[in-house]
Image (cartoon, rainbow, N blue to C red):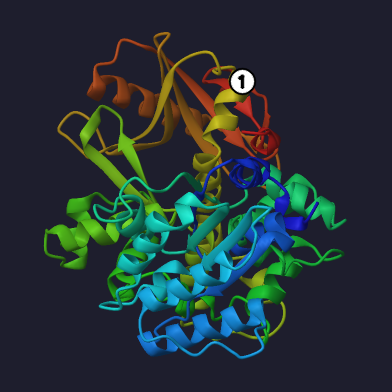
């Protein structure tokens, strides 16, 4: 099994079922940049790919057509090379004629990578591709795989297309980053064998992006790896931020502006707050940008408890972007030992707490499983209140509202030792609970649950307030 197939069993099965079916298949593979889409497709299909083309970013129609011709000549190797067509209708006709000249005894794969880059404006590509699929590919022994990092574009222009591609996608894969269990399995496969604490530290900076995780080396601690990958002169991820968003979105300046706003607001922002802070106009353009960032996995919406309609807050979830904006951008970096210096600062303490909260929010299913809530319907939300005449402002990291008349209030803490509950902290949690109960008027039983790295040292203060203690180890369970 190839490295990136760690945790990709379900996605690989989807691709194999398309290959085994008795009809033409149109498979759309979505997922953000560097998440391993191309590797998954090539590794699964290998020698069954009869034609493959990758779009060229920011290229003209002429250049895209020449790229198509070059790839066709590479796959076919005709005695006389094909000449560049004048249109995409002509190009797809060339492709159809090529495969019609073969007896397709085995199902063949046609792979169009970076699909949005090929479909330049006024190029006629999508229309020609629709004709290709509807008049030939759907009726022949082929799998057509279209792949793109701009997930929102793929959904709007292909999945939800009202024209020739309407309802034509037969299978869809949205490839997500690795979770913690998959990341640990990937490292184990490389014979690195990091413990859970080291793995979480790496995940907090790199996320579960396979292409980033490839830069990790065994025999080095998480801190040493982070120092080399981000802060050395040849650090692989020093310049990634400048490339990341323009590769995914047109007019990426708006996307980056929202990312920067959210990077400054750990508690997340409502749509209104994004408009006010960013001085955006309240229109469809903003909705499109937010939707694109959400589909691509950079931000995540969370409901504020009791406010499903108007209580959505958006939170920056991309580990790399958060790390870059906090520690790399506009910093004068030395070559060695920078991360160790940063780890002594208040900025590090605040960042690590936020990054750990994000990890917990990404692994909600594992937390629910550890609390034995598998068989109980529950909804996850956050809670944030402002100061009133009766109560002060308060925030609860995560709530699990259960159908058995119980709400788990979760406190999420990243520590490098056992957490010790002080008298003052226990009192703070009691106040939070009282404020929540007063503001929401809930009649449900409230339980405080603590989610931390190494657990909690039990004492008189913890026994009086904490009902459940969870450690980082539960986050490594299968979802």
Q: Residues within 10 Å of mark 1 (few under 14, many from 20)?
A: few
Residue found 55% across the figure and 31% down from its top: 365
Give the labeled residue for mark 1: 460
Q: For this view, does 64 lie left or right of residue 394?
A: right
Residue 367, position in %: x, y? 57, 30
Looking at this view, is 143 or 361 the one in front? Answer: 143
Residue 35 visible here: no
Q: For this view, does 190 lie left or right of residue 407?
A: right
Looking at this view, is 269 or 212 the one in front? Answer: 212
Residue found 68% across the figure and 45% down from its top: 7
Q: For this view, does 307 lie left or right of residue 344?
A: left
> On the image, which quarter does residue 102 sit in?
bottom right
- Where 428 sits versus 374, above or below? below
Looking at this view, is 335 or 249 the one in front? Answer: 249
Is label 1 in a helix, a strand or a loop?
Answer: helix
Residue found 52% across the figure and 84% down from its top: 69
Residue 395 visible here: yes
Residue 301, position in %: x, y? 34, 45
Residue 95, position in %: x, y? 51, 71
Q: How many marks?
A: 1
Residue 92, position in %: x, y? 44, 71
Rendered-image quadrant of the C terminus: top right
- Where 428 sits versus 261, above or below? above
Q: For this view, does 244 lie left or right of residue 14?
A: left
> On the image, which quarter does residue 119 sit in?
bottom left
């Amino acid at each position: 099994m190839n490295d990136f197939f760690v945790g990709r069993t379900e996605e690989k099965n989807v691709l194999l079922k398309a290959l085994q079916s008795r009809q033409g298949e149109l498979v759309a593979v979505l997922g953000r940049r560097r998440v391993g889409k191309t590797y998954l497709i090539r590794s699964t299909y290998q020698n069954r790919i009869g034609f493959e083309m990758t779009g060229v970013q920011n290229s003209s129609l002429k250049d895209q057509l020449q790229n198509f011709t070059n790839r066709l000549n590479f796959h076919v190797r005709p005695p006389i090379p094909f000449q560049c067509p004048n249109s995409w209708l002509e190009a797809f006709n060339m492709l159809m004629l090529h495969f019609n000249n073969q007896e397709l005894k085995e199902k063949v794969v046609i792979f169009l990578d970076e699909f949005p880059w090929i479909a330049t404006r006024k190029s006629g590509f999508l229309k020609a591709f629709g004709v290709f699929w509807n008049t030939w590919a759907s009726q022949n022994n082929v799998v057509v795989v279209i792949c793109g990092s701009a997930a929102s574009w793929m959904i709007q222009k292909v999945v939800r297309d009202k024209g020739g591609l309407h309802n034509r996608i037969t299978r869809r894969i949205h490839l997500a980053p690795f979770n913690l269990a998959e990341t640990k399995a990937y490292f184990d496969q490389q014979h690195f064998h990091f413990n859970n604490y080291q793995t979480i530290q790496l995940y907090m900076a790199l996320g579960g992006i396979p292409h980033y995780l490839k830069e990790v080396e065994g025999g080095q601690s998480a801190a040493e790896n982070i120092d080399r990958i981000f802060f050395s002169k040849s650090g692989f991820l020093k310049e990634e931020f400048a490339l990341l968003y323009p590769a995914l979105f047109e007019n990426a300046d708006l996307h980056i502006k929202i990312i920067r706003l959210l990077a400054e607001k750990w508690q997340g922002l409502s749509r209104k707050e994004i408009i006010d802070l960013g001085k955006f106009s309240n229109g469809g353009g903003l909705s499109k940008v937010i939707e694109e960032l959400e589909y691509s996995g950079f931000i995540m919406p969370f409901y504020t408890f009791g406010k499903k309609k108007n209580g959505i807050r958006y939170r920056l979830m991309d580990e790399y972007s958060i790390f870059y904006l906090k520690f790399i951008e506009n910093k004068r970096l030395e070559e060695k030992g920078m991360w160790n210096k940063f780890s002594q600062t208040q900025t590090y303490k605040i960042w690590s707490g936020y990054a750990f909260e994000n990890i917990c929010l990404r692994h909600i299913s594992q937390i629910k499983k550890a609390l034995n809530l598998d068989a109980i319907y529950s909804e996850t939300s956050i809670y944030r209140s402002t100061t009133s005449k009766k109560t002060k402002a308060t925030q609860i990291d995560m709530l699990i509202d259960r159908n058995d008349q119980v709400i788990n209030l979760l406190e999420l803490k990243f520590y490098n030792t056992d957490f010790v509950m002080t008298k003052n902290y226990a009192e703070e949690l009691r106040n939070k609970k009282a404020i929540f109960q007063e503001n929401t008027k809930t009649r449900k039983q409230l339980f405080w649950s603590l989610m931390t790295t190494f657990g909690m040292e039990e004492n008189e203060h913890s026994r009086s307030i904490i009902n459940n203690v969870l450690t980082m180890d539960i986050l490594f369970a299968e979802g």
